[in-house]
Amino acid sequence: MLLQTDKTERSSQVERKHRDSFGMFDGYDSCSEDTSSSSSSDESEEEVAPLPSSLPIIKNNGQVYTYPDGKSGMATCEMCGMVGVRDAFYSKTKRFCSVSCSRSYSSNSKKASILARLQVAGKPPTKKAKVLQKQPLVAKLAAYAQYQATLQNQAKTKAAVPVEGFSWGNYINSNSFTAAPVTCFKHAPMGTCWGDIAEGVRVEVPNTDCSLPTKVFWIAGIVKLAGYNALLRYEGFENDSSLDFWCNICGSDIHPVGWCATSGKPLVPPRSIQHKYTNWKAFLVKRLTGAKTLPPDFSQKVSESMQYPFKTSMRVEVVDKTHLCRTRVAVVDSVVGGRLRLVYEESEDKTDDFWCHMYSPLIHHIGWSRSIGHRFKRSDITKKQDGHFDAPPHLFTKVKEVDAAGEWFKEGMKLEAIDPLNLSAICVATIRKVLADGYLMIGIDGSEAADGSDWFCYHATSPSIFPVGFCEINMIELTPPRGYAKLPFKWFDYLRETDSIAAPVKLFNKEVPNHGFHVGMKLEAVDLMEPRLVCVATVTRIIHRLLRIHFDGWEDEYDQWVDCESPDLYPVGWCQLTGYQLQPPAPQSSRDSQSSSSKQKKKAKSQQYKGHKKMTSLQLKEELLDGEEYSFLQGTSDQESNGSASYYIKQEP
């Protein structure tokens, strides 16, 4: 045994002697390269039995309706089978219960039931899936709740099915797109330590143009960068792009030049160009002299930047997705790329969940609601479950400190705000209540519930609120109060008619960081109306720090206004790096069907939000009887900024 070990060591020493400082074999020319291999995998989905068609009884806001199909006043969603009040349904024909169902119907055939496409609990569903945890306009069928829970339990054993047919590399190459650089996303892995990685940087990568029985490497240069993804070309190919390939620069097979030499890995030139040079060592010395490569500790930095402080079983306060006016306790179930899957504490089967980033303004430490006077739903669970513990307060995003002692926001002041129920719109709004620590309760004029149950909370430094006149001076369409007849809307007239005043401009956050975004840049963005989905998206407008995000393949009416520092925006390749599922652009068939009905959808959208807010009010009134309520935050972006630029607001006398 000892003799055999000695022989192995001597053989290893001889092999190392045959490699030069680049890790190249002196005798690579004799390597045999006549075979190649490839692999493929088949993927399938289990089909789930369709929802029973006869469910005669529903419970909606405390009232029971008997529903014979077609009865006036009630309707059935053609996508998910939801039964509800007809007037609150989406689209002119009242065929769908929500925007999500309308979207899903346009991209699926009627036969492909949405129930057959549910993902594993705790993993992001496809864009085609109906996010059942997001409340539509009516409460879920009582009879269907148990049925859904059964399906979810069955789904837990299924593996996630990756999106087929979409490649960021092909998408960018075929359309000559540009992606937002990683440095635009400070919250993303490597966002603050990306360094000088750019076109021309050399790396060592696996040589795929080789059929040796062992894994070998070669040097490649970055031809184009798109987020984390890089288009690479092997050294020696010059202007020949035939073997160019895309890869994630943060992947485990990407190394700085010199890694092969220190790791004892062989450098072998691609088979297609072996004949071009007789002295590859001299070629590499010439090509690499003065060239840049990755830092030696690049892989270590990548690993460190993907360590997240939030852990499973931590308890937090998060917005109650069924009642936007309050928060409730939830438990961290999983962490994917800094995104948290939170399960509401009272959910016994762990299907009642909510997705957000760990830096989201929607989550807070336990006790936050009470400390600022925010509405809160007390849990029915009297004590913590075994293993659950409160997340430390220092883990949460800190808002900028404000001085409310002098001139400050007051109740009744007017402003402009992004509507959290319609993120494509900036609306006329009113400050309804001033909370502690700089938080404000805001209502959208013309569509508020009498009890304030549809108010939402933004911090005074939030980039989602704006002074009166912001939309006009920046040529953004301002959404007037619903039912306001004096159009076009003029702030001066409206302030006089309502006997109100505008919030002082100096109280708003006017800092604009040097964010680096440009119109047309591609990125991956969360659909904040379906927060478990991360989609292919484009920056279509930039107003100071405000970005207009368009979801590729979808109608403009689904666009969303997002802050440039929002933790819901990610570089191209983020999903691949973290293992999150990316939703590809909508297919052409979906775009055609959307185009033909866009006008009806836009008209129906305002009716939908109005119905939703009224419904929320009714649900809240029921629970107020128990005395367990207490207001909510539905922001869409970070509240802090680091820049110093400012914008100017035009105000009428």
Image: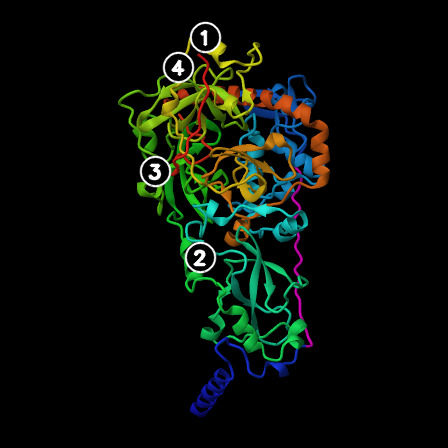
Q: Are marks 4 and 2 in contact (CB under 8 Å)?
A: no
Of callouts 2 and 3, which one flags the residue occurring earlier in the amino acid sequence? Answer: 2
Q: Which residues are magenta?
A: 34-51
Residue 540 at x, y percent in the picture? 58, 36
Say which quarter of the image contains residue 390. Answer: top left
Residue bearing the label numbered 1: 496
Residue at point 60% right, 73% down?
269
Q: Classify mark 2: residues with Cα within 10 Å, few (<14), some (14-19) or many (20+).
A: some
Give the label on residue 412, or none: 4
Quick one: 350 or 461, which is closer to the camera?
461
Q: Are marks 4 and 3 in contact (CB under 8 Å)?
A: no
Residue bearing the label numbered 3: 398
Gap in Å between the C-alphas at discs 4 and 1? 13 Å
Gap in Å between the C-alphas at discs 2 and 1? 57 Å
Give the label on residue 17, or none: none
Give the label on residue 302, or none: 2
Mark 4 vs mark 1: in front = 1
Task: Find the residue positioned furthest to the bottom.
Answer: 3
Check if residue 530 falls in the magenta segment.
no
Q: Main secondary structure of the magenta part?
A: loop
Of callouts 3 and 1, which one flags the residue occurring earlier in the amino acid sequence? Answer: 3
Gap in Å between the C-alphas at discs 2 and 3? 25 Å
Please tell me whether residue 52 is drawn above or below residue 433 in the rendered image.
below
Gap in Å between the C-alphas at discs 4 and 2? 49 Å
Mark 3 vs mark 1: in front = 1
